[in-house]
Image: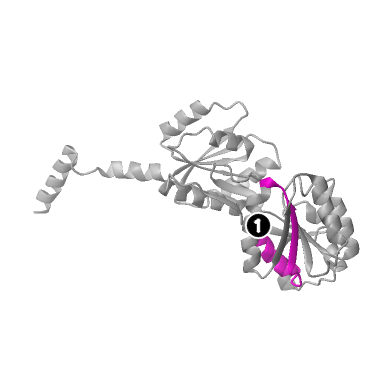
């Protein structure tokens, strides 16, 4: 009887009525394949890309194919190679990767990473810190703060919309102003420092070349904030070293995991676009600034500090 059943199944396979085991296996293999494209860059950027890739590859049930991408890449050749390999899911890193993402047809699910992008029609995870995480860190290192002041340009408007929701959920008042040039931002902060600003106020510097200019706005704010004993925090990694109370920088391994998860979600809903601010973050705190502001941190709190300044 068993022999008869086996024989009938074999006949059905030959006739094509039942899918073969090999075909099912090939289908699963295609589903689990992900290509990662990253620029041919020198350190420290190459190391950063490798950390992101390691995070992506921590999804051990997936099959990853790594590709270096050069400035003169041929998108048609890349598309042909992806089709040949049966890869439909693609992660791209850096500016060159972003350029490639815009050239890939809709048959591919593509996410972009390792770039401080704003929403632009390409799915991905920006290197710009999610305001919700920033405000959580603010609660940790400066719990007295009740108001957050920020100047922003049009490019950062999407981030401020997220910040309003995040601030409300954390009982913070967000005082924001949209500016079109750096001089407007400076004037906003000049007026702020001339007002009744107190220890319950903080200034947030987003990644914004207009409102948070490193050579104009930042030094002015840090000088005034020091004399007024006002908290300054930033989305830009280098600002904690320069005197902001704290700033954030990417957890590259965590970002890689997020990118892998996002590209799989996109493959299940190919008509959707997904975009997110960075939630895989690490905290840098300037302990000299903290002491000046009168903050003392317990050993438990300091376990959340991945980097401190002065070094």
Q: Position of residue 265 (x, y in %)?
A: 46, 51
Which residue occupies the foreground of this view, 148 or 43?
148
Farthest residue, direction right: 227
Classify residue 310 as left or right of residue 146: right
In percent of width and height, residue 140 lies at: 71, 69
For the point 24% across and 43% down, the residue is 19
Q: Quadrant of the C terminus?
A: bottom right
The boundaries of the magenta stretch are 130-155
Q: Nearer the viewer, residue 144 or 111?
A: 144
Q: Is residue 214 visible?
A: no
In this rendering, position of residue 115 left or right of residue 183: left
Question: Is 52 left or right of 270, judged from the image as shown?
Answer: right
In the depicted structure, whether residue 3 falls above or below residue 148: above
Q: Quadrant of residue 37?
A: top right
Relative to 83, say whether 56 is above or below.
below
Question: Residue at coordinates 83% horizontally, 46% vertically from top-left?
Answer: 183
Percent x, y for residue 253? 60, 52
| SS for dot 1 | strand
Q: Residue at x 16, y 38 (%)?
A: 15
Q: Which residue is mark 1?
A: 281
On screen, residue 237 versus residue 280, left or right, reads: right
Q: Would residue 268 be counted in the magenta stretch?
A: no
Q: Quadrant of residue 285?
A: bottom right
Question: Is disc 1 surrounded by few (<14), some (14 to 19) or many (20+) residues within 10 Å?
Answer: many
The residue positioned 69% from the left and 37% from the top of the image is 42
């Amino acid at each position: 009887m068993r022999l008869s059943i086996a024989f009938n199944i074999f006949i059905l396979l030959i006739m094509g009525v039942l899918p073969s085991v090999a075909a099912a296996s090939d289908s699963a293999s295609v589903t689990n394949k992900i290509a990662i494209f990253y620029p041919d860059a020198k350190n420290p950027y190459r190391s950063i890309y490798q950390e992101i890739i390691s995070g992506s590859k921590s999804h051990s049930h997936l099959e990853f194919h790594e590709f270096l991408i050069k400035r003169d890449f041929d998108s048609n050749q890349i598309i042909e190679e992806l089709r040949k390999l049966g890869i439909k899911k693609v992660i791209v890193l850096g500016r060159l990767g972003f350029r490639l993402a815009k050239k890939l047809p809709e048959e591919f699910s593509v996410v972009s990473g390792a770039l401080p992008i704003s929403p632009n029609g390409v799915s991905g995870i920006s290197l710009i810190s999610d305001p919700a995480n920033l405000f959580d860190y603010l609660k940790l290192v400066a719990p007295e703060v009740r108001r957050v002041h920020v100047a922003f340009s049009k490019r950062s408007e999407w981030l401020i919309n997220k910040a309003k929701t995040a601030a409300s959920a954390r009982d913070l008042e967000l005082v924001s102003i949209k500016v079109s040039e750096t001089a407007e931002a400076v004037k906003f902060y000049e007026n702020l420092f001339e007002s009744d600003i107190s220890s319950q106020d903080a200034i947030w510097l987003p990644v914004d070349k207009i409102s948070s200019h490193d050579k104009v706005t930042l030094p002015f704010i840090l000088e005034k904030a020091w004399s007024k004993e006002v908290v300054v925090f930033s989305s830009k990694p280098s600002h904690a070293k320069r005197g902001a109370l704290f700033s954030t920088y990417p957890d590259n391994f965590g970002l890689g995991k997020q990118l892998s998860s996002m590209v799989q979600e996109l493959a299940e809903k190919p008509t959707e676009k997904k975009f997110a601010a960075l939630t895989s973050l690490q905290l840098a705190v300037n302990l000299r600034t903290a002491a000046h502001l009168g903050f003392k941190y317990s050993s438990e709190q300091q376990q959340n500090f991945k980097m401190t300044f002065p070094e």
